[in-house]
Amino acid sequence: MNHSILRTLACCALLGLAGGGAVQAQPAPTAASLPDFTGIVQKNAAAVVHVEAKYSGERQTTQQSIGGQMMPGQPMPNDPQAEILRRFFGMPMMPSPEQQKHTSLGSGFIISRDGYILTNNHVVDHADKVTVRLQDRRTLTAKVIGTDPTYDIALLKVDAGGDLPVVSIGDSRSLKPGQWVLAIGSPFGFDYTVTQGIVSAVGRNLGQRDQPYTSFIQTDVPINRGNSGGPLFNLQGQVVGINSQIYSNTGDYMGVSFSIPIDVAMNAVQQLKTKGYVSRGKLGVTMQAVNDDIVKAFKLENGAGAAVVDVTPGSGAAKAGIQPGDIILTYNGQVLQQAADLPPLVGMTKPGSEVPVEILRNGKKMTLQVTISEASRDKDAVDNQGAMSSSSRSGSAALGLTVQSLDNDTRKQLGLKPGQGVVIDDITGPVAAQAGLQAGDVILMVNQQKIGSVAEFQAATKGVKPGSTVLLLVRRGEQSNFVGLTVPGNR
């Protein structure tokens, strides 16, 4: 056979043309496996509302700067291009920079046919007048039934004659990373904007002191200013979250968004309806993460759980026998992967309930029954400034610090019990200095051993060996934390 013919046949075979057959084109990728959100939008858009809050004076900014987090409902930047759009293209919902000082824009959704609406507290906080606009363009005055700044929830009520469209409420506890979710809201005043993405993480604690009881749903759904208070839907068309925050250095979406779980929000709704405020459970402990120093000092397998650094006298934790130095492993059957898991679980517990709390103490596990009390709605002010006693002084060269005892008057001013704690008098070496300890810090424990005198401190630190880690429970101001000091090894 001619070599040219062979080459031709080989090429035809490679191209799927051998024997004169037609080209068998590979099927193009289809969208069959991708979700179609049109049904969810058509079913639920009418139950989503645009929220506008008016202020007679200049309103306070809603921006949060902790860790770069910013609320999506903050004022829009003074952008000339935005001003051109507003003035020449008829976009009244994009207020001018001057109007922004007296206006807050956000989103919300109707949860009952008689006019109850959920949104974020930061959208309507201290507003003089709140209005909502429905999909049929009706604008209604809304009454603020109640708010809860801790959960960032606000419950509104409008009178629209009943039979309003409502959303279906889902179960945020069933969410898993990777699931599709959908948001409907009014970013920058653009009503009924639909954005989609996936759940990036669940149970996310943002480390904010004003929202310790919320484990957020993290998504990559594009959320911007004006989306605040709007619903987050699952593929079943059920609301699983309230869009609340973004993580950004600019104030605009950068790929990470956070939503309040709907289970938390609906628990708040029922309480706001019935008593006008939200009750949260209180365990009565101050805790911190189980860091590497604690793992090393306590010889733990990992950093799971929450380390107890203080116990409130008379609290349920104190009465049950929980002590500083305990590691809380589970709460009411829920395993704590990290310390941040504990506050949301406690907050959702009904005051008066008795729950099992599993702890680790001196290498042994035990379960205590704790009666949960009601958390105060106001912060307790504690004066932790006091004078030091100079009755006695001692130090530890290995740890690089000296301590002195406290008299009972000073302990009382510090909120300590008689015979509790010694105070750092001076930092004398690099070990304590590198750990960030300061003169005036109060040492409450050394390696889970309570310290109430200079003699007890000396005894607890006498056998410190090079290369070992000594764990101190240190109180500074209102905060107590475990601090690990690693003694340099022999060279």
Image (tube, rainbow, N blue to C red):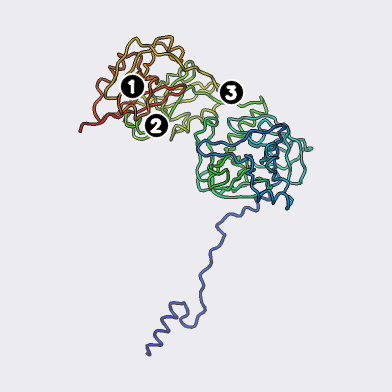
First along the sequence among labels 2 and 1: 2
**Which numbered circle lies on residue 377?**
3
Q: Is residue 186 left or right of residue 375?
A: right
The vertical placement of 305 against 225, above or below, is: above
Q: Is mark 2 on a helix, strand or loop?
A: loop
Between 374 and 459, the residue placed more toward the observer is 459
The correct choice, above or below, for 182 with respect to 351 in the image is: below
Q: Name the residue under label 1.
A: 446
Q: Give the CA distance from mark 3 to mark 1.
A: 34 Å
**Are discs 2 and 1 less than 8 Å apart at CB?**
no
Amino acid bearing label 2: Val
Q: Do the residues labelled 3 and 1 touch (CB within 8 Å)?
A: no
| Left or right: 335, with 181 as reference point | left
Local packing at callout 3 (Cα closer than 10 Å; few below 14, some 14-19, many 20+) is few
Q: What is the quadrant of residue 94 in the picture?
A: top right
Q: In this view, does 104 lie above or below 365?
A: below
